[in-house]
Amino acid sequence: MNKTRTMTTIAVLGALSFVLMLVNFPILPGVDFLKLDFSIIPILIGLVLFDLKSAYTILMLRSVLKLIFDNGGPGGIVGLPMNILAIGVFVTAFALIWKDRKKTSQYIWASIAGTVGMTLLMLLLNYVYAIPLYAKFAKFDIEQFIGVGKYLVSMVIPFNVLEGIIFSLAFALVYAAIRPILQKNSH
């Protein structure tokens, strides 16, 4: 692909990722603020077509568009950096473990590593970043509501594990469907 076509493809994938980010839904009953979206699919497509740097560029483009057009207020502003890091960890696992080999076993290992990495990162970031910020600025103290430990174990861990599984299965289906196109056009 020439440079103009590469940049155009990255821009289109970033815009598509942003649109997919707008279509989100909760996956745990009673936890409406933890939502899943499929904005990772164009990011992973960018990884397959190009490289990790391009995937990160798509992620950042999607995130800037989200911040500009639909930031979601304080919750979105606290959550967006966490989302960027979580998706970044997941995509990095795929870049390091699966991208160059593209074997089913490597895909499974990348899925596991991405899910575990994302879950551990979200545990840490919720504990040191999100929970204190929500308590300070939104006057919502999870400790008084259900307790930090219970929140992390009963909500953060299950959500991220389920999200990682769904991401892995969804991309496997998309990749299988468009694999010939991706192979023809990838670097």
Image (cartoon, grey):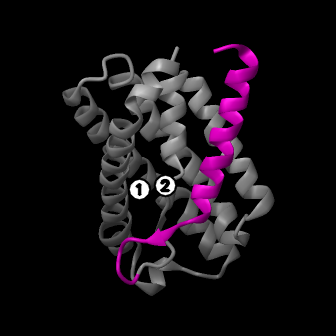
Say which element carries label 1: helix
- Point out the frontmost of discs 2 and 1: 2
Q: Which residue is mark 2?
A: 38
Classify residue 104 as left or right of residue 37.
left
The amino acid sitting under disc 2 is Phe
The amino acid sitting under disc 1 is Leu
Classify residue 47 as left or right of residue 10.
left
- 181 or 106, which is in the foreground? 181
Q: Magenta segment, principal secondary structure? A: helix
Q: Dividing the picture into quarters, in which one does residue 151 lie?
A: bottom left
Classify residue 102 as left or right of residue 56.
left
How many residues crowd mark 2 within 10 Å: few (<14), some (14–19), many (20+)?
many
Q: Position of residue 128 (x, y in %)?
A: 52, 57
- 45 or 31, which is in the foreground? 45
Q: Residue at 62% across / 40% down in the picture?
A: 13
Q: Which residue is mark 1?
A: 123
- Per the model, the C-alpha gap separating discs 2 and 1 is 21 Å
Establish if 183 lies above or below 46.
Answer: above
Q: Position of residue 57 (x, y in %)?
A: 66, 33
Q: Position of residue 150 (x, y in %)?
A: 33, 74
Q: Residue at 73% across / 65% down in the picture?
A: 70
Classify residue 147 as left or right of residue 109.
right
Query: Residue 26 colored magenta?
Result: yes
Query: Residue 14 colored magenta?
Result: yes
* Magenta region: 1-30
Say which element carries label 2: loop
Question: Can you name the residue that lies furthest to the left here?
Answer: 105
